[in-house]
Each structure stands twice: as structure tokens, then as C-alpha cells.
Image (spheres, grey):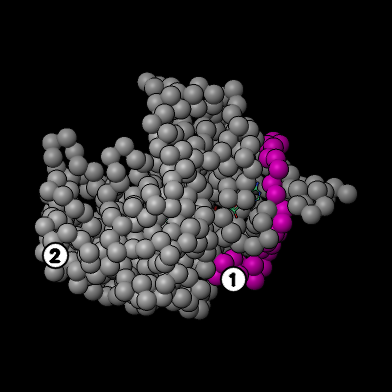
Amino acid sequence: MRHTSKADVVLIGAGIMSATLGMLLKQLEPSLRIKVIEKLDTAAAESSDAWNNAGTGHSAFCELNYTPEKEDGTIDISKALKIAESFEVSKQFWSYLVKNNFIKNPGNFIHSIPHISFVWGDANVAFLHKRYDALQQNGLFRQMQFSDDAATIKKWIPLVMDGRADDSKVAATKMNLGTDVNFGALTRDIFEQLSKMTDVEMHFGFEVSNIHKHDNYWQIEVKDETTDEKNYIVTKFVFIGAGGGALPLLIKSGIPEAEGYGGFPVSGQWLRCNNEAVIEQHFAKVYGLAKVGSPPMSVPHLDTRWIKGKRELLFGPYAGFTTKFLKHGSSMDLFKSVKFSNLKPLVSAGIHNIPLTQYLIEQVMQSDEERLDALKEYYPEATMKDWELNEAGYRVQVIKKDDEKGGILEFGTEVVHSSDGSIAALLGASPGASTAVSIMLELIKKCFPEKSVSSGWIEKLNHIIPSYGKRLSDDEVLMQKIRSETHKQLGLALI
Ligand SMILES: Cc1cc2nc3c(=O)[nH]c(=O)nc-3n(C[C@H](O)[C@H](O)[C@H](O)COP(=O)(O)OP(=O)(O)OC[C@H]3O[C@@H](n4cnc5c(N)ncnc54)[C@H](O)[C@@H]3O)c2cc1C
């Protein structure tokens, strides 16, 4: 039997994005009736789960693709500043959740871990030095250390240095303020608290199969995954936080702003270390440079992780070709997403990115030996018996219209929303979960403009996020004060 219910807000998908938005909205307006619809039987089982992403608290401390070298040889640090500021905002929100007892134990989801960039070869060493010098100009990166002395680097990352040729020219930067974040644990902690709040309902095992606009409300069609029965929810606001599943739903919404958007899925794999003695010897997230011609998401890294209270060691991700939009998705996802409205951008982006597609297909076809060779660049004495291959999460990169090229492929995240602010979707996956709070604050500003101004929301946001509306990269004193408070609250390193 068909059943229709009402909500003020529907959040589609139970990943970190919906969790963040739901919690923020409930703090701003406790009377909101929120329904969360998730097709799987638990929260954070797609990209937000710890095994599906790298768990790097992206702060641009070690990710070299956030500081490109310009044609004149100088380093552009604008993206690094934005990402570092966004992560400071995330830490403020999480500190608020801890301070207010929404999260009991921050050690369940966040740990300090040095973030290290490591490069070899003259040109790369020169680049790293320039990057370090440029970042030193800003307080956000003041504690970063640089070394091109092999003995010093060996102290920082012995696994990476042991067995390396004595004459190889290497350099590294180290930032002790880096973090490893278990976004899955964080998402589940937030939803656990949200589900206890008045007027919040979580529905697992239900898939949103369609979205229609009727006058001034949205009708959400929800399919029970067990019985196939369809029910409906009517709501004034809907957030499509469905990760890789967001694009198909955005297209179904029919809003003009969605026109021309397409998706390019990329799968991922890790090598997971199963030798405790090796895991114990590494204590860092070590990021290198992506190979020339390879996409930014294929930057290799050797990562210490904390998952379910245990230290782990992962290498990867190895990006690969897929036609699925979600790990639990269908091989038809890519083909079904092709519509008349996005055909031109898809074809144009496809033509311009043939080398990328070739690269991804080659990556999927790699043998164990080839994967081991890639690992050995970071851990020269690695042996395959200590490692097993695991599937990572999937990312759907954004394809959009472009006046000049017809269509372009982008590697960032993008919020697409209707002009009346009644529906918004998050597309793309990078820098992703680390910047969830900033992304959702921006979404709130765009979708609830009048509330933001007249209903006391700004005052509340200033309380939740002390740096709200301020640029921490311009105010070192405030940044240091906030950083030391959040690090204390979250149990993180202070220097
Ligand atoms: C390999 C890899 C490495 C990454 N590394 C990092 C990193 O180091 N640091 C970082 O900050 N970010 C990283 N990211 C990005 C980060 O994981 C994502 O940005 C983030 O998890 C996205 O969260 P989300 O809530 O949008 O999506 P998800 O966590 O994917 O959640 C979407 C949910 O929607 C559900 N859903 C889908 N369709 C429907 C539907 N029709 N009806 C109902 N439910 C639906 C899904 O089942 C899923 O539970 C990485 C991603 C990948 C893939």
C-alpha cells in the first residue's frame, strides 16, 4: 500500500555529508523534522567507511597536488590555504560535538599522525624546497620541517629509507600536526546522536528511486529494498548526499541547474599490510608526487591508519576503470547516466581524456608484481607476502559543460542547487570528507539565505565555529588560538 509522510528536510544517503548537514541543521533549528533515507542497512558503508577512503585529514600538509608549480616557476599555494582552512573549520565543528557530549571519545575517530611529503630526483627535490618556502609564508604551515638529509629522513620514515640507494637524492617535509580520520566511525557517531533527537528518523534499506517537484514541495519516491513497495515523502528541502549515487538523482530532479552534468567513475584498490612487525615500523602518512600524466587521485601514499582501535598500514590507492558509480552499485550506472542533456559534455570530456581512460584501464590490469614495484618506490624492502589487495571506495568525477571544449572533467567537489534553494546535491569526491563542514556551511548559506540572516543562525554558527566568516589564513593569532583549543578538545598533538 502506498503511504505518504511529511518532513521539513530529507537527507538522501547516510554518509559523512548527510551526517554533517543533519547535525548542523538540528543545532541551528532543533524543531526541524528530518528524515534520512539510506539504501544500505547501515550508515557510512560507501565512500565514508574507513576502509574505502585514505582517512587523511586533508590540510595540504603533505598533498603535493594542492600546490602546483606555475609557469614562472613559483608555487601557487591558494588551494593549499583553502583546504587547510577548511580542515580547521571541520576540527572546530568536531570539537563542538565533543564539548557538547555528542561524541564521547574523539579517539574513536581522529588521531595525530605526521604528514610527510617525500620526493626523489633533483627536479622534485627543488620543487619540494620551493613548496616548503612558499608555505612557510603562512602561519597555517609554520610548524612544517624540511630536510634533504638522508639520515634525518630515515629517522622520520625508516621503512621508506631502508634499502634505498645511498646516492639517491631525496627530500621530505614533515608536519606533526597532521591527522588520520576514521570518517566511517565519525559518521556513525553523528547519526547515533541524531537518531536520538526529536523528529529525526533514519530509514535503512530504502532507496530513493525518484524525485519530483510539485508546486512548492518535493515528492521523494522511496523503494523498500526488501519488499519493493514504494512510499512517498513530501518535503520543502532535499539534500542529495548519495555519494556516487547523487548524479542520477540530481538528473531525475529535472532542475535546470543539473543540465549538462555527467560523471566519470574511478574505482580504487589498496595494498593492506598484514605483518604487524612492518605496521609497527611506520608512523606517518607519506605522500609522493603523481606520475606525469596520471590523475591527481592516483598520488600514491603509505599510510598509517587507525581502524577499529587497531593500527593499520595501507598503500595506494591504485585507481582503476569502472562503470559503477558506487561500490554497491550496478555496472550499468555509467550508461544509464547518459542523457540527451549531458551527451555533448560527456563525449567531449571523453575525447579529451582518452589517455586518462587508458591509464585507468592499465591500472586495473596490473599484475601483483607491478603493484609491488609501485609500493617499492616508497618501501624498497617490501615483499608481497606481507600485503593483500583490498577494494577501496569509488569516486565519480564531475563532467560539466564548457563553452570552449564542450565538456570538461573536474577533480574537485561541487554543490549543485536549484535557484530557490529547495534542493541541493553534492557531486565529486575531492578533497572530500575532510572539508564536509565547510561544504555544508556553504550549502546552508545558499539554500537557507533568509534563515541565515534573520533567524539567529549566524549567531549560532559563530558559537559552533568560532572562526565562522573569518579567514584563518589572514589571522595567525586567531588561527593558533583556535588550533590549540581544537587540538586539546580532540586529543591531538599541540606542536
Ligand atoms: C579511494 C578514496 C580515497 C579517499 N580518501 C580521502 C581522504 O583521505 N580524505 C578525505 O577527506 N576524503 C577522502 N575521500 C573522499 C571521501 O571518502 C568522500 O568525499 C566522502 O566519504 C563522501 O561522503 P558522502 O556522504 O558524500 O558519500 P558516501 O559516504 O558514499 O555516502 C553516500 C550514501 O548514499 C547512499 N545512497 C546512494 N544512492 C542512494 C539512493 N538512491 N537512495 C538512498 N541512499 C543512497 C549510499 O549507499 C551511501 O551510503 C576518498 C575517497 C575515495 C573513494
Q: CA distance from mark 2 to mark 1?
A: 48 Å
Crowd rating for badge 2 (residues with CA inside 10 Å; few <14, some 14–19, many 20+): some
As drawn, which residue projects farthest toward the right?
1
Name the N-terminal-most of marks 2 and 1: 2
Which quadrant holds residue 167?
A: bottom left
Task: Report if residue 344 lies within the magenta region.
Answer: no
Q: Secondary structure at mark 2?
A: helix
For disc 1, the neighbor class at 10 Å (few under 14, some 14 to 19, many from 20) is some
Q: Nearer the viewer, residue 291 or 4?
A: 291
Q: Image quadrant for the C terminus?
A: bottom left
* Amino acid type indicated by mark 2: Ala
484 versus 52 height, above or below: below
- Residue 381 versus residue 168 in the image, above or below: below
User: Residue 371 location in percent, x, y?
Assistant: 39, 52
| Residue holding disc 1 | 193
Residue sitting at 48 percent across and 76 percent down?
309
Residue pictured at 47% horizontal, 33% vertical: 399
What is the secondary structure assignment of the residue under circle 1? Answer: helix
Tag of residue 150: 2
In the depicted view, which residue is nearer to us: 493 or 82? 493
The residue type indicated by label 1 comes to Gln
- For this view, does 169 lie left or right of residue 449? left
Residue at image position (68%, 40%) is 211
Residue at coordinates 22% horizontally, 64% vertically from top-left? Answer: 163
Q: Position of residue 105 (x, y in %)?
A: 48, 78
Q: Is mark 1 within 8 Å of ligand 1?
A: no
Residue range of the region highlighted in magenta in the rendering:
188-215
- Location of residue 21 in the rendering, given as x and y in whole percent from the top left corner: 53, 56
- 192 inside magenta stretch: yes
Is residue 459 something one can see in this rendering?
Answer: no
